[in-house]
Amino acid sequence: MFGNTTIGIDLGTANILVYNKSNGIILNEPSVVAMDIHTKSVLAIGQEAKEMIGKTPTNIIAVRPLKDGVIADFDITTGLLREIMRRVTGIVGSSVKRPNVVVCVPTGATSVERRAISDAVKSMGAKDVTLIEEPVAAAIGADLPVDEPIANVIVDIGGGTSEIAIISYGGIVTSTSVRTGGDHMDDEIIQHIRKNYNLLVGEATAERIKMELGYAPIPHTEATLDIRGRDLLTGLPMTITITSTEIQKALEETLGRILEAVRVTLEQCPAELSGDIVDRGIILTGGGSLLHGFQEWLVHQIDVPVHMAPNPLESVAIGTGMSLEYIDKISKKIN
Ligand SMILES: Nc1ncnc2c1ncn2[C@@H]1O[C@H](COP(=O)(O)OP(=O)(O)OP(=O)(O)O)[C@@H](O)[C@H]1O
Ligand SMILES: [Mg+2]
């Protein structure tokens, strides 16, 4: 009588979100797992596990099982998904016992990677698993008219991947996926501080610096931040003051790669759709697009309007959950 509940999962490199039509975003947690290295049991996931990164005793590891947008460690990802399913069932009730699950994959994912994602989701008790391309989900979640014959351009800057896609008539006309994003920005910051100050800072500190002090290459009023780390020469804790100008410089290369991918995608746009882009512009989603000045910088570089999606961190999950309504046109079913 009642069909199985459908839930959408954005299995992101940085964050996992679960969406369901009647409940909205049910769960939103960092994609991090803390586990006992001997027993392999999952000790914590999500925010709790993220806070453990770089701070655990030797018998516990806090890891991110998804790297560059795809599954790097299958067993840990499966453990993470099981715990997520347990929580979702707790929140929504037993009606989600054997849900139909739609999960997004980066457009650049190989068939082996797609199969791994599908298998991991099945192993958490899903009845049916459908995969959808991440930028299509982002476009649906950002309320774009993806099933109309007009160019919808999505630029999704995630933790591990940046995806640029032109979507029309419910499908991808052309797309580019680069395996870079917010995580690389954090790495660049770690390298910069190491090279220039002989100071080692952890991932969490680097991410905080990026959010507070990171700017796309635009003019801005310089800000400073005191940060703490370990002096590589003495091994002792040390505090230094860094400026937004130097962090901006450290992020240039990653941003350059993203810009190049945007340019390449726009160049591949069929002439008939190019006019739409000039009129309608492009839509930004993904946490990386929240970098200070990113939107302004992109407008300046590509000279077409650039808009921020209403919920840039949630668009993919919302679109994934809503996508079954568009499914005949835009998704590929894997059994
Ligand atoms: N205000 C902000 N400024 C700069 N970066 C931010 C901000 N908020 C979040 N981020 C970055 O956005 C990234 C996470 O974005 P998102 O949740 O869209 O990624 P994801 O979907 O998990 O990754 P992927 O799509 O690559 O698998 C992280 O690198 C995070 O540091
Ligand atoms: Mg994402």
Image: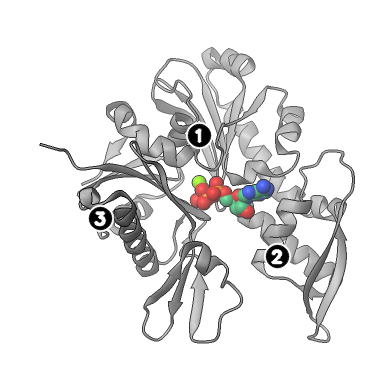
Distance (Cα) linking label 2 and label 3? 35 Å
Is residue 43 at least partly visible in the picture? yes
The reply to whether callout 1 and callout 3 are in contact (CB within 8 Å) is no
Secondary structure of the residue carrying tag 1 is strand
Which of the two labelled residues, at mark 2 and mark 3, occupies the earlier sequence position? 3
Q: Amino acid at mark 1?
A: Ser
Q: Nearer the viewer, mark 1 or mark 3?
A: 3
Vertical side of 197 occupied by 308: above or below: above
The residue wearing badge 2 is 205
- The residue wearing badge 3 is 122
Q: Amino acid at mark 3?
A: Lys
Amino acid type indicated by mark 2: Thr
Give the residue drawn at x 39%, y 68%.
76
Numbered label tally = 3
Drawn side of residue 186 relative to residue 140, left or right: right
Q: Which mark is residue 175?
A: 1
In three-dimensional space, the C-alpha distance between marks 1 and 3, rounded to whole angstroms, equals: 28 Å
The quarter of the displayed image where residue 25 is located: top left
Coloration mode = one colour
- Mark 1 crowd level (few <14, some 14–19, many ≥20, 10 Å Cα): many
